[in-house]
Amino acid sequence: MKARPLIRGLLKLVGGLLLLLVLWQGGIFAQVLWWSQVNPASTRFMRIQLEALRAENPDARLRHQWVDYERISVHLKRAVVAAEDDRFLDHAGFDWTGIQHALERNRRRGAATAGGSTISQQLAKNLFLTPTRSYLRKAQEAVITVMIETTWSKRRILEVYLNVAEWGAGVFGSEAAAQRFFGISADRLGPAEAANLAVRLPNPRRYEQHFGPAQRAHAARVAARMGNSRIP
């Protein structure tokens, strides 16, 4: 008889936790729907980095300026797709072929050096999550990716990604990146400049300080194939 109150208590606890989870995911989904029409003024990644910068300089500010899709160079759009997610238009948020290839490369190298994240997954992480790695964070990233892919067009996904991606310490979005590295606006980027920016995305703060021969060679490879990239 004493076990029944305990079971009821456990069921209530589990039910309460499930309700909190549903409410949490519902709040995220509402934000995803809002951002399908309204441009994000800030992201989780932006807030995290601004806090870190202000720990050293209370007056620190991020460099970020939103520009509409039409005002971003077509070369940058093609370069980012070529460098980060060349099957962007063909998948529904997860590039299973790319994931398999990444796992095979990691197995050959004996370390997790290659990832298989799509632009949609990277966007989900940047908007809502943190840079820390865990299975729980990866699961939440997958859920948000499904939300975004279900409710946004590919054009909107690429537009928001190009406006919130990090390109250096405190540098977010293609306009700030174009100004930071080339002193021009995002709509004036040529193929070589676009490829140069695209290959910085995996490790932007490191490549801001150390952009050497390996990165320049990678940029040349991206420039050579970006003409075949399909963009929305």
Image (tube, helix red, strand yellow):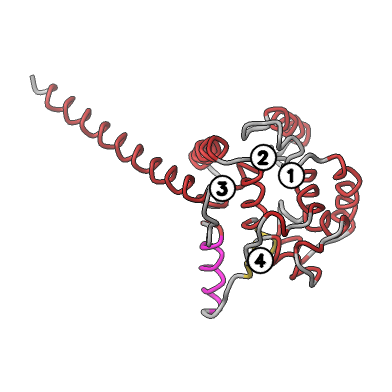
Measured along the vertical axis of the image, is residue 18 above or below residue 232? above
Residue depicted at x 88% and y 42%: 225
Q: Amino acid at mark 4?
A: Val
The residue that label 1 is drawn on is: 84
Tag 2: Cα neighbours inside 10 Å, few (<14), some, or many (≥20)? Answer: many
What label does residue 19 carry, if any? none
As measured in the structure, the alpha-carbon distance from the residue carrying label 1 to the one carrying label 3 is 15 Å
As measured in the structure, the alpha-carbon distance from the residue carrying label 3 to the one carrying label 2 is 11 Å
Residue depicted at x 43% and y 45%: 28
Residue stretch rendered in magenta on the structure: 46-57
Residue depicted at x 75% and y 63%: 186
Tag 4: Cα neighbours inside 10 Å, few (<14), some, or many (≥20)? Answer: many
As measured in the structure, the alpha-carbon distance from the residue carrying label 4 to the one carrying label 3 is 17 Å
Measured along the vertical axis of the image, is residue 29 above or below residue 187? above
Q: Amino acid at mark 3?
A: Lys
| Residue placed most toward the observer, 24 or 205 | 24
Q: Position of residue 219 (x, y in %)?
A: 86, 52
Earlier sequence position, callout 1 versus callout 2: 1
Q: Position of residue 79 (x, y in %)?
A: 80, 49
The residue that label 3 is drawn on is: 125
Local SS, label 2: loop
Local SS, label 1: helix
Marks 4 and 3 in Cβ contact (< 8 Å):
no
